[in-house]
Structure formats: C-alpha cells, structure tokens
Image (cartoon, coloured by chain):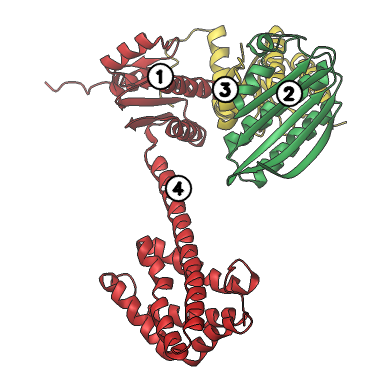
Amino acid sequence: MNSTKSNTLALRSCEDIVHVRQTVRTWMVEQRFTLVDQTKMVTATSELARNAVDYAGGGTAQLELLEESGRIGIRVLIEDHGPGIANIEQAMTDGFTSGQGMGLGLGGSKRLVDDFEIWSEPGKGTRVSITRWK
Amino acid sequence: MERIPILKVGEFLLVSIQVDMHDRLVLSLQDDLTAQVVVSRAKGVLIDISALDMVDSFIGRMLGNMAAMTRALGAETVVVGMQPAVAITIVELGLVLTDVRTAINVDKGMALLQNLLNESSVIDSHEFHEK
Amino acid sequence: MTTTTPNRIADVLTRHEQPILEDWLREQLAALSARQDLISEADLRRQSTEFLALFTPACRMGNLTDITTPEWKPGCDFLGDVSRSRAIQGFSPSETATFVFSLKQPLFTRLRQELGTDATALAEEMWSATVLLDKLGLYTTEVYQKTREEVIKRQQTDMLELSTPVVKLWDGIIALPLIGTLDSGRTNVMMNTLLQNIVATGSSIAIVDITGVPTVDTLVAQYLLKTVYAARLMGAECIISGIRPQIAQTMVHLGVEFGNVVTKSTLADALSYAFRQIGCTVTKPAQRA
C-alpha cells in the first residue's frame, strides 16, 4: 500500500471539525468518489472528530491518499490524548454513550467505512483509523 | 457573526440552511427561531436542508431539538429537501430522527403543515381531492 | 562489438524499408484474412508504415532491451493506440498481437540476407530482435487486456442503470419494478436511483415491486429496509409489493421483520393503497342502463 499524499490537521474547536470534513470532501471529489461514498466518509470523519474535540480535549486528524494494486483509498486517522476507552467492545455498541447523547460515534462510523481500526488505552488516548476504498 | 436568515411565508416560517453548521451557528439559530415563532405567531416551521451535504448525529440532534422547541411553542416543524446521499448515510449510521417530520420539498412540506393545521382546527372529511 | 550490433537491425530496416513493409503487410493480411470486415488494407498499410517510421529511429538509439525508456515512448504510444482501437473493434488478443509478431519473419529474412555468412552475428541479431519484438508484442496484449476490462466495466455500469427503470405511475407516485437476482452492488444502484427519482419528480410515494426477484436473502431484505427508511427520512413513503408466498416464508424463517413497512402482495394492491394515501379514488363510470 502506497501513501501518495498526506496532510495533518489540528482538531481543537468545532470550526476545526468543519474544516477537517471539508478537506476530506475536497479530496474525495478530486478522486471522483461517488456522492454516497463521499457523504459516508465525511459523516464518519465528523463523528470521530467530534468525539476527539468534545470528550478528549482535541487532537489531530491525518488524511492520507492511498493506492493499493490500482485501487484508490482515503484514510483518516483521528488521534487524541484524552481519557481513552476502557472497554472498546462496549463502546462500539449502538446506544452506548460516554458523554452526553453521543451514542452512534464509533459503531455508526464503522458501518460507514470499509476499514475501521481502533487503538485505545485508558489515560493515554485513542486512535481511530477509517478508510474508504473507491 | 454570520446568521441563518428566517423568512416569514404566510403563517409559516422558512429557514434555509446553506452553510456547514457549527455549534455557535446552531445555538444562534435556535435562539432566533424560537424568538421568531413567538413574535410572528407562526403556525409552522419549514427547515430546508437541500443544500446540506451531510447530517451527522450532532446536526441530527439539533434538528430534533428545534422541532421539539417549536412544537412546545405551538408550531410544527417539517424538515424538507434532504438529499438521497444524506438519507442513505443517516440510515447506515443508525441515527433515528425521532419526532422530526420530513417532506420531499418545500411545496410538499407546506402542504403537510397546512394539513396538520386543518386537522387540528376543523376535521373536514371532504378535504381530500386530487391535486 | 556490442556497440555496432544494434545498428545492424536499424541499418537493415532503413535499407530494406519498402520490401520489409510489403512482406510484413502480406504476413498480416494472411493472419487476418478472416477479419477483412474489421480493417481495410489501406488502414493496415497506414498503421504499418507509421509504426516502422517510429520503430527504426528507436532501434537506431541502440537500446533493444528496455522499452520503458523515452526513445521507445512514441512507438509504444502508437502500439497502445492500435491495441486499444483493435480491442474496441472486436479483434482477438492474438490477432492484435500479430501486428508486432508478424514483423519477425520479414525482418529475419533480410537479416539473413545481410549477415548470411557471419553465423555468430546473425544469431546475435536474431536474438535481440526476438527479445525486442516479444516485449512489444506483450505490451500490445497488455494494453488490449486493459481496454477490454474498461469496456466490461462500462458495460456493467450501463447494465446496472438499465436494470433499474423507475417509472412514474401517477402524479406523486413512482414505481421501480425489479427483475432478476439482487446483489449488493445492484441494490446500491437501485436505492440511489429510486431516491434520486423521488427528489426529481417530487413524489411522495415510491413502490418497489419485487415480483421478478427469485429469492430474497437476509442481506437483500436489509437493503430493501434501508431503502424504505432512507425514503422515509426524505419525506416519502416506500411500499414493497410483489412479495410471493415463498419469499414471505423465507423471510419469516430468516427472522427478517418488515416491521412498520407497508408491504403488499401485488403491484395493484400497492397502487390502490398509494391512491388512498394521496387522496385519490378510482371509480368505475356509472353503469349505462
């Protein structure tokens, strides 16, 4: 798998969330993903970015353009240094909420993308990587 | 600071969301809308989201909240113009827009509000005829 | 010695250009005798002349082993165009590769004439010409393959679009009659087309008729449900009709619940339900006495 383009954006405020998802949208339009693919990826990014801003005091979003045996993919890695998640399996279930009213973030985002990976350690932070292939 | 305009159309209010929503904009819209419902004594609210290219759980919750707020003030809210890609994404995400009425476009939304208004005032069984 | 060898091929090509071209054309015509409907002799002559004009100077540069270098680019680009057009015209892969491979015979004949006495030089030149022409031949096959794949891909998308005909039944009522097996790709396209049409026509009722769908498994049922929910989010009602007894049984066995989704056994039932929803009544004209 080759990474042909990369960009790291800060996630501190709600304006940053808007900026990150607009950047993801632009990249996907450039790579001519379908409108539904674009919308799913942008929405998943938005959910995860909001988790990082609202519950972990901010973090970063790293966008990467991937190429693997002729296929184009876009990966977004959202990283924070917040409280982390003790029970990932439980956090992935719909309806589970840590803050106020956020229950769809992880499980829902996973359904919107092709690849979903999560690493978390309580007290250290959380990294979530999502990829959508064309 | 940017604000989302609220137009008065007859007995209804029309809000057209044309920009990417962030938190402060949402809060100011909620303030403006609830105030306008009271001032204009509107009987219904149409929120046009045809220009919105995504609805995540935050925006979904905001739409639900606005519908609940205006309902408490005596005006039903109908969300109109949701794009297909947005609808597909919401279903996949598992987001449930409880108590939010929807219509395909502003025309249909207006007709729905009118129907709701008629139902609540006089029940007219001869009301139905082909458009 | 290695510095002089490559130029022998170029020399032969330059010196015997016309006879090589004629021999080569004869070879090609013989191989393509059954294909005269697809390409005319004049076109073939034009393509061959053009290729030789690019091939000879590239040979003269001295590199006969690596065709990815800049001096080979014009030749390869031209071959690519020939391959692509032949793939689209309906030539077979071997007929396409013949274009390059049939150059061997005329070229070898001339080489033999020139170097007949020098067995070592002849073997050397034949070998490098073989390697070179094989590489170019494989290149044409590769381009051919790629073009065919593109054609197939495009046909698949075309077919998907053709297989989702959304029809307007009444003002505000559209229907999508589905025929054939539903897989996830097709269901995705179907869902998209239906929802787009709801917006475009401003319809508040959409009927998905699955009379022509042989089986419904859990995945397909889920897709249908998602379509219904997405339509509902947009403010339209989606009715599923044409559920045959076996399908109803399978769905119950699979544990698929259509919950609060309106389902009808025939398209006619769905239509009459839709009429009621939009406030239309259908009456027979008063009977004549």
Query: Does dot 3 land on a helix, a strand or a loop?
Result: helix
Q: Amino acid at mark 3?
A: Glu
Q: Which residue is mark 1?
A: C279
- According to the picture, the residue beneath numbered tag 2 turns out to be A48
* Residue at disc 4, secondary structure: helix
Observer-side mark, 2 or 1, equals 2
Residue A103's quadrant in the figure? top right
Q: Residue under label 4, please give it.
A: C153
Pointers 2 and 3 in contact (CB under 8 A)? no
* Lower sequence index among marks 1 and 4: 4
**SS category of the residue bearing label 1:** loop
- The structure residue drawn at horizontal position 71% and vertical position 37%, both measured from the top left corner, is A24
Question: Mark 2 and 4 residues: CB-CB less than 8 Å, in contact?
Answer: no
Q: Colour of chain A?
A: green
Q: Residue at x 75, y 37 (%)?
A: A63
Q: Subunit of mark 2?
A: A
Mark 2 or 3: the one toward you: 2
1 or 4: mark nearer the eye: 4
- Amino acid of disc 1: Gly
From the top left corner, tell me how far across and down residue B92 is, in percent: 57, 22
Query: Position of B68 compared to C76: left or right?
Result: right
Q: Does mark 3 fall on the same chain as mark 1?
A: no
Chain B appears in which tint? Answer: yellow
Chain C display color: red
Q: Are marks 3 and 4 on the same chain?
A: no
The image shows residue C153 at horizontal and vertical percentages of 45, 47
Location of residue A75 with respect to B75 vertically, above or below: below
Compare residues A124 and B69 and report the one nearer the observer. A124
Please provide percent x and percent y for residue C19.
Answer: 40, 90
Distance CA(mark 2)–CA(mark 4): 34 Å
Q: Where does label 3 land, which residue?
A: B92
- Rendered-image quadrant of the N terminus of chain B: top right
